[in-house]
């Protein structure tokens, strides 16, 4: 049974990838995810300045997933670079450096800086929804998404993943613009929303930021539809992210057109072994259904 897959010429021994922001701040956490079966690991998004992020509470658990507004907290870039270098040296799987900027030129600057640590890929997070001073996510305009992609490509020789937001009217137009400007892979989706949870006893919003991005099982149908739409219009591979908690969830995402699946919230629900478990469940499904290679599943829903 062959569950290996490929992203822009880089072979992954299974399709599970640690999604950005979950376990991705330190080299040791990334190492743990890889030792637990993740075929590639993505760092928490790294920014150009140290940021405290929002006050607690920043995450609230719901029946159907999580609502979070971390506020892009991150250490200063030197510390992030130190952890990234450590991760590249010690993790036995491709390390993907996720990053953001507050302007197009800052995306270029960050790409140049992070490339010095020689990760396998860069992932431009153009989709973070929970930081008011940033205004609308850059990824909600096709034109801006294209400009950021171009600026990053001009600043690095590394393969580039661009991570899209689902909170747009036409994700196909954005995917096309990102591909046209040089993205090697698209990752979809970041959190859905914003959403809100109110504590009915205190009568106050639970999150200090009031609003947050939704993740976990409740967003899977949206993620599957976004990946399906993107696969329809682009040639580059897609990492499907959003609500993947089991082997069957992974199959659904692969059938929509993903070449690999990102897993975030499920690490909270099933623990870090979720990567190995999802891969085992995927293998069991393939055996039962008579598939021998992942290529037979990828994009199957398109007929
Ligand atoms: C606590 C938390 C922090 C996150 N931080 C980031 C981040 O720093 N950068 C990013 O691109 N996505 C971030 N995400 C989004 C996830 O990478 C993923 O796109 C989203 O949660 C959907 O996948 P899931 O349902 O498997 O969690 C974060 C998600 C959560 C729950």
Image (spheres, rainbow, N blue to C red):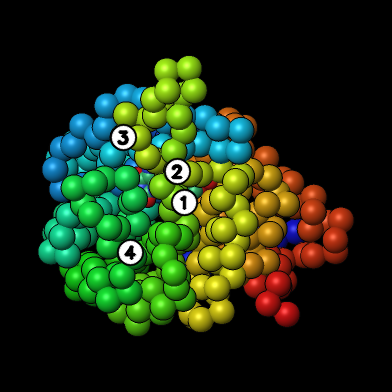
Q: Considering only order in the chain, which callout, 3 or 1, is on the residue closer to the N terminus?
A: 1
- Residue 69 picture location, percent across and down: 35, 38
Give the SS element for disc 1: strand
Give the SS element for disc 3: loop
Q: Considering only order in the chain, which callout, 2 or 3, is on the residue closer to the N terminus?
A: 2
Give the SS element for disc 4: helix
- Residue 38 picture location, percent across and down: 54, 45
Query: Which circle, 2 or 1, is nearer the viewer?
Result: 2
Distance from the alpha carbon under mark 1 to that under mark 3? 16 Å
Q: What label does residue 209 carry, if any? A: 3
Q: What label does residue 260 carry, if any? A: none
- Ligand 1 contact, mark 4 (Cβ < 8 Å): no
Quadrant for the N terminus in the image: bottom right
Residue 166 visible? The answer is yes
Q: To which residue does mark 1 refer?
A: 192
Task: Decide if residue 184 is on the left or right side of residue 222.
Answer: left
In this view, the residue in front, 92 or 184, is 184
Q: What label does residue 139 carry, if any? A: 4
Which image quadrant for residue 55?
Answer: top left
At a point 26% along the width and 45% down the height, the residue shown is 131
Marks 4 & 3, CB-CB < 8 Å contact? no
Label 4 Cα crowd, 10 Å radius (few <14 / some 14-19 / many 20+): many
Distance from the alpha carbon under mark 2 to that under mark 4? 18 Å
Q: What label does residue 195 carry, if any? A: 2
Marks 2 & 4, CB-CB < 8 Å contact? no
Distance from the alpha carbon under mark 4 to that under mark 3? 21 Å
At a point 60% along the width and 38% down the height, the residue shown is 64
Q: Considering only order in the chain, which callout, 4 or 1, is on the residue closer to the N terminus?
A: 4
Which image quadrant for residue 82?
Answer: top left
């Amino acid at each position: 049974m062959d569950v290996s897959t490929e992203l822009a010429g880089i072979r992954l021994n299974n399709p599970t990838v640690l999604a950005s922001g979950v376990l991705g701040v330190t080299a040791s956490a990334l190492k743990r995810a890889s030792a637990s079966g993740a075929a590639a690991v993505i760092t928490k998004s790294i920014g150009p300045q140290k940021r405290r992020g929002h006050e607690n509470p920043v995450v609230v658990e719901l029946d159907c997933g999580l609502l979070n507004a971390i506020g892009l907290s991150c250490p200063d870039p030197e510390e992030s670079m130190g952890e990234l270098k450590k991760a590249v040296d010690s993790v036995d799987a491709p390390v993907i450096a996720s990053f953001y900027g507050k302007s197009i030129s800052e995306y270029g600057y960050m790409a140049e800086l992070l490339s010095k640590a020689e990760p396998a890929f860069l992932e431009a997070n153009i989709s973070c929804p929970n930081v008011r001073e940033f205004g609308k996510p850059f990824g909600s305009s096709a034109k801006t998404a294209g400009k950021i992609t171009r600026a990053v490509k001009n600043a690095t020789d590394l393969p580039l993943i661009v991570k899209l937001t689902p909170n747009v009217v036409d994700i196909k137009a954005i995917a096309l613009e990102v591909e046209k400007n040089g993205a090697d892979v698209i990752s979809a989706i970041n959190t859905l929303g914003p959403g809100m949870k109110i504590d009915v006893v205190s009568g106050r919003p639970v999150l200090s930021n009031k609003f947050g991005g939704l993740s976990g099982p409740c967003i899977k149908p949206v993620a599957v539809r976004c990946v399906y739409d993107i696969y329809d219009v682009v040639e580059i591979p897609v990492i499907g992210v959003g609500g993947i908690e089991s082997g069957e969830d992974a199959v659904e995402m692969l059938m929509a057109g993903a070449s690999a699946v990102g897993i975030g919230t499920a690490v909270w629900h099933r623990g870090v072994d979720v990567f190995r478990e999802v891969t085992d469940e995927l293998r069991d499904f393939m055996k039962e259904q008579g598939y021998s290679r992942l290529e037979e599943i990828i994009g199957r829903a398109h007929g």
